[in-house]
Image (tube, rainbow, N blue to C red):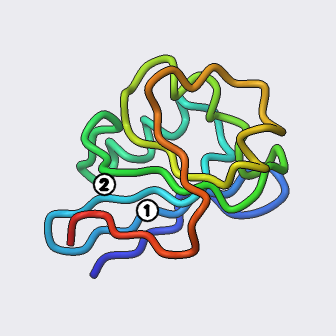
Amino acid sequence: MKVIVLASGSKGNSTYIEYKNTKILIDMGISSSSLEKKLNEIGVSSGNLDAVLITHTHVDHVGGLKTFVKRYSVPIYLTEIMYDELEINFNNHEFVTDDKLNIKD
């Protein structure tokens, strides 16, 4: 398992997790372009993520989400309450309301 903190703190939070063939991002508190740069530095393409999990809707956890969902069709997982709080057009992105979640591996 690989866990890499891409950003941490009041200016933005984002953590990359990789297990076998599964690539997950937890939170997207930095700009989409900054995130792409940081992912590229570790050899990961933003479009190849299997999922983005959002923990809560504070700007330091969702700051880059709006632009990201316009660029990529990666599934976004968040609760229905978070979905309602965010003014983002998710189009065909997924959101979950259950406690349990399985993503690939």
> Circle 1 sits on which residue?
16
Q: Label 1 sits on what residue type?
A: Tyr
Mark 1, Cα crowd under 10 Å, few <14 / some 14-19 / many 20+, is: many
Q: Is residue 78 left or right of residue 46?
A: right
Dots 1 and 2: beta carbons under 8 Å? yes
Position in image of residue 43 (x %, y %): 23, 49
Q: In this view, does 22 lie to the left or right of 10?
A: left
Disc 2 secondary structure class: loop
Q: Looking at this rendering, what residue extends furthest in the front direction?
A: 98
> Where is 41 relative to 85, above or below?
below
Residue 63, by quadrant, is top right
* N-term-proximal mark, 1 vs 2: 1
> Circle 2 sits on which residue?
42
Q: Looking at this rendering, what residue extends furthest in the bottom direction?
A: 1
Give me the residue at 59% from left, 22% from top: 67
Q: Locate the N terminus and report the quarter of the image it occupies.
A: bottom left
